[in-house]
Amino acid sequence: MFSTLSSLQPRQFLTQILNFALVLSTAFMLWKGLSVATDSPSPIVVVLSGSMEPAFQRGDLLFLWNRGLDTQIGEVVVYNVKGKDIPIVHRVVRRFGGGEQPLKLLTKGDNNLADDTELYARGQDYLERSQDIIGSVVGYVPFVGYVTILLSEHPWLKTVMLGLMGVMVVLQRE
Amino acid sequence: MSSQKIAVYSLSDLKNTTDDALPNYLTSLKFAQSHLLTDVRLALGYTAVIIAGATFYADWKLGWDATKYWTFWAVLVYFMLNGVLTVWIWGVEKGTVFRGEINHASAGRNTLSISSSVTKHIPIYNITVTSTDPTGRETKTQLSSPFTRWFDADGFFIAKPFQQWLAAEIPLIGQVDRKNAPGGEGMVGGREEAMAVVVEGRLETPRKGGAGEMMPPGSTRSRKGRKG
């Protein structure tokens, strides 16, 4: 029996590490599971700009669905522009192709005066449904994503939060 | 372990310290501990964690589109392993704190498995002892004792009364650990089959701990004379 060679202590240690690792990995795999289910690389996003007001405010949390590629006019989609990192939430106002042809879409923010051609990458006049879109909005929770906006816009808040947590740890110790 | 001071009002501290002391005591009696249960748990858990880690790395390096297909399988296998792990912990381990066997001179080859539990907010240590004698007969006993028996008011674990409790209540341990078994050397012996029979016993109250609590009567008949 090889297992009797080592004592219980390293096993207890490994078990503690495992419990911690399982918490982290389960959170990550749930996220990935949601990605697989919705077929979207990022199935939950936070609205960062006011360009879709009054439909969506800054800080709204959006749930995306990326199955069923036949996107219709009027749907709100989230897309990535090539070469830019930030996903954009706008409404589909024109569609070309579809069926046998690859579907192409033109989008516009409800609160913007012009359509999105300005926002697209240089030389790009429309979005490829199968490549650029990461999902259609199927549900939302107002405002709860605002914390992430605050944290990204005011980095000092992160420091404050970390500090508060540190103080709490110190205070809780007897 | 026993030199560590714990908070006496923390039930999990009481239980964890006792759980740790149990295998320490039994291995000191030359019980050979089997780590199979823990090893299977660790293998299941770490396989799952490695799968998640690999998925994270692949996603980070290659992006979503390239990893989509494999992410599906990784998620599936990950949660299946998690399910098996949960079943293993709740259905198979069931709070087992010690599993092992001993090849004892007089009693032969016996296996012993002890699982422990506590009820929320009640400072009583419950254990279920399952032992198998050389003929393959299984004996299952449930025991309970207040933690005050082996923790002093300052939160120090006192090994002696704890060991006496186990040696008195569990025939197999009493047989091996004559020093802690009640009436130890002078007992009138029965036969081997009667090993697990619990009879009304002459039992002194333990010298330490256990203020005011009753020690349930119970002693073992064991083979006379020989020292374990």
Image: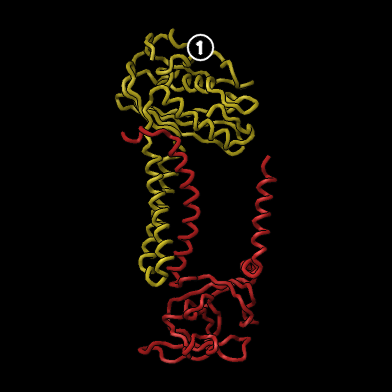
Chain colours: A red, B yellow
Would residue B5 be found to the left or right of residue A122 on screen?
Answer: right
**What chain does badge 1 belong to?**
B
Q: Is residue A103 above or below residue B135?
A: below
Secondary structure under tag 1 reads: loop
- Rendered residue at 48%/90% (across/down): A125
Residue B195's spot in the image, x, y percent? 38, 19
- Rendered residue at 42%/47% (across/down): B87
- What is the count of numbered marks? 1
Would residue B77 be found to the left or right of residue B25 on screen?
Answer: left
Q: Amino acid at mark 1?
A: Arg
**Towards the viewer: B51 or B114:** B51
- Rendered residue at 47%/11% (across/down): B183
Label 1: how many Cα within 10 Å (few below 14, some 14–19, many 20+): few
User: Picture quarter containing residue B146?
Assistant: top right
**Towards the viewer: A68 or B32:** B32
Looking at the rendered image, the quarter that the C terminus of chain B falls into is top left
Q: Is residue A59 above or below residue B110?
A: below
Residue A50's spot in the image, x, y percent? 64, 80
Residue at the disc numbered 1: B202
Residue B45's spot in the image, x, y percent? 41, 49
